[in-house]
Amino acid sequence: MRTLEIYRNGILAGLLIEENRKKYIFRYNETYFIDDNNPAISLTLPKTQREYSNEFLFPFFFNMLSEGVNRKLQSLQLKIDEKDNFGLLAATAQYDTIGAITVNLI
């Protein structure tokens, strides 16, 4: 099991958990959830107290990953299996992402 802290503009928004390669869970942090000034991190993951579960990495997070040659180069340089979406997300989305979301491996 691997866990990522999900940050939106530097504020802890929730946790993304990979229980195994066929079960992913996302849940909002309680403090983030109760603050009405904090928006949902994605339209596909509205703010709710319930846990989101999926057999694939949620499309919102999957779309943060590189594709094609860039993905291949990243996986070679970082020594991460090219099919390990969670591992690539943990390694590449920590600091400089295009949007407001960053991650931190716990």
Image (cartoon, helix red, strand yellow):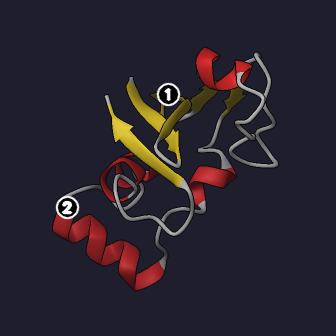
Q: Which mark is residue 78?
A: 2
Q: Dividing the image into 4 quarters, which one contains the N terminus?
A: top left
Q: Residue at x 63, y 15 (%)?
A: 30
Q: Residue at x 37, y 55 (%)?
A: 88
List the residue tagged with mark 1: 17
Percent x, y of residue 22: 56, 33
Percent x, y of residue 46: 81, 36
Circle 2 — which element? helix
Percent x, y of residue 65: 49, 64
Q: Amino acid at mark 2?
A: Leu
Residue 78 appears in which quarter of the rendering? bottom left
Q: Residues within 10 Å of mark 1 (few under 14, many from 20)?
A: some
Discs 2, 1 touching: Cβ within 8 Å: no
Where 6 falls versus 65 (above or below)? above
Q: CA distance from mark 2 to mark 1?
A: 21 Å
Q: Dividing the image into 4 quarters, which one contains the C terminus?
A: top left
